Image: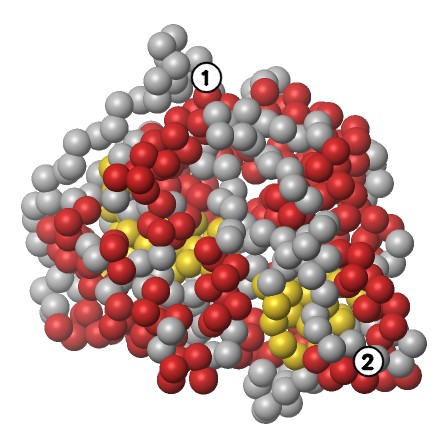
Amino acid sequence: MKTRTTRAVRSACAGLLGLTAVTACGTSGGAPPAAKPATFEGRGPITYVAGKDTTGTVQAVLDRWNKAHPDEKVTFVQLPTDPDAQRQQMIQNAEIKSDAFTVLSLDAVWTSEFAAHRWVDRLPADRFPLGRMLDPIVETATYRGGLYAVPATSDGGMLYYRTDLLRRAGIAEPPTTWAEMKADCAKVKKLPEAHGMSCYAGQFQKYEGLTVNVAEAVNSAGGTVTDARGRPHLDTPQAKAGLDFLVDAVRDGTAPKEAITYQEEDARQAFQAGKLIFERQWPYMYPLAAKKDGSSKVAGKFGVAPLPGLHGPGASSLGGHNLALTASAENKATALDFIEFFTNEENQRFSLKYAPAAPTYASLYQDPALVKTYPYLPTLKRSILHAVPRPRVFRYGDLTAAVQRAAYAALTGEKSSAQALKDLQRALRHPMAE
């Protein structure tokens, strides 16, 4: 844990220095002092707060808890599917110190922000088997050497591609670079069965998914959104190459025109309808696209690979959700037990049967039975181990809003890539100026 927590301290304070150097770090440059572990007392009913569960998996896990704990039942509070709306509702609850929300399912990148504001409690690390989880995932749950959440799921972007069409075009392996992907598309689109198809899409709507896609593109071109000290580095050739990849894809027809309206589900439906040759997507799409009930036109005709980059395999943004305990909540003894239950290996294995969430335990990626059922697991593990977290900053909302504005302006032609990045560099240095 020493190396892991040391990195977490650097990363968290870096965000503070990059976005709120005066108000957050103080004149000495240090981040706010970490909170002491809370006193976990009180038993009784609690709430679990997360985005809408479209699979039914969460309620199935809650039912298991509620059956065994009739006097400490958990009520599921479902928030909108949009992550920005989820974050806002959680912050509003925290700011008024309400006890309506007990256990929060935080996007992994929000942990530092919620911990720094002391909206969530510091947790006792010895209660959880962190050593059995993948290191990059555990790091997202820490802040200044303390554990403020427990990883429940992870996530990594992968390149979905049409194996049948590549094979018919004489292409033996999926592309590892953007140039290879475009060249492969050109070959595939000469096939009669590929008539009317588009090459590639991701999630380009003006929301959190765009921040993810932009960060991936920048990192996959050898750049970085913020450096180790939290300073923005978006006025670089590498950052421009990354944003240019997305902008050029929309402008030259590599991506369909409607791609600038795509969130996860829009892109998934386009791929499953046979409209895309390649798509950047999370693992949740795999079993949906593989269904042979008529809902997917690509069942048995697709595979997954690491995301491509400028000169070789790219880097995914590290996704996932961590469970945190609201500082103003009641019945914290029950809540701590519930977090331990919800995040244990048995429940992650159970959940994997119903939804393809990326597990946090290393052993589940090596289980032969699971790999047979979910062939994407080895690729997903590589994606997670080589993923780059979105900037873990004190005021993440300001950062992601600035990235979305700048990138969307470039995608829609309102600004050039160079101007958008110049404006973004300035916005992240002076986030309150806009």
At horizontal 35% and vertical 71% (from top left) the residue drawn is 364
At horizontal 72% and vertical 65% (from top left) the residue drawn is 175
Inter-mark Cα distance, 1 to 2: 54 Å
Q: Amino acid at mark 2?
A: Gly
Element at badge 1?
Answer: loop
Would you name the residue on which mark 2 appears? 170
Is residue 281 shown left or right of residue 20? right
At horizontal 61% and vertical 68% (from top left) the residue drawn is 305
The answer, for residue 277, to whether it is visible in the render is yes
Is residue 147 shown left or right of residue 137? left
The answer, for residue 284, to whether it is visible in the render is no
Image height check: is 164 above or below 80? below
Q: Which class describes the residues within 10 Å of circle 1: few (<14), some (14-19), or many (20+)?
A: many
Element at badge 2?
Answer: loop
Residue 416's disc number? none
Q: Quadrant of residue 403?
A: top right
1 or 2: mark nearer the eye: 2
Is residue 69 shown left or right of residue 248? left
341 or 51: nearer the eye? 341
Image height check: is 203 above or below 424? below
Residue 21's disc number? 1
Q: Position of residue 331 (x, y in %)?
A: 13, 49
Q: Are marks 1 and 2 in contact (CB under 8 Å)?
A: no
Q: Position of residue 83 (x, y in %)?
A: 50, 50
Which residue is most to the bottom? Answer: 293
Q: Earlier in the sequence, mark 1 or mark 2?
A: 1
Position of the N terminus, as image quadrant, is top left
Image height check: is 290 above or below 261? below
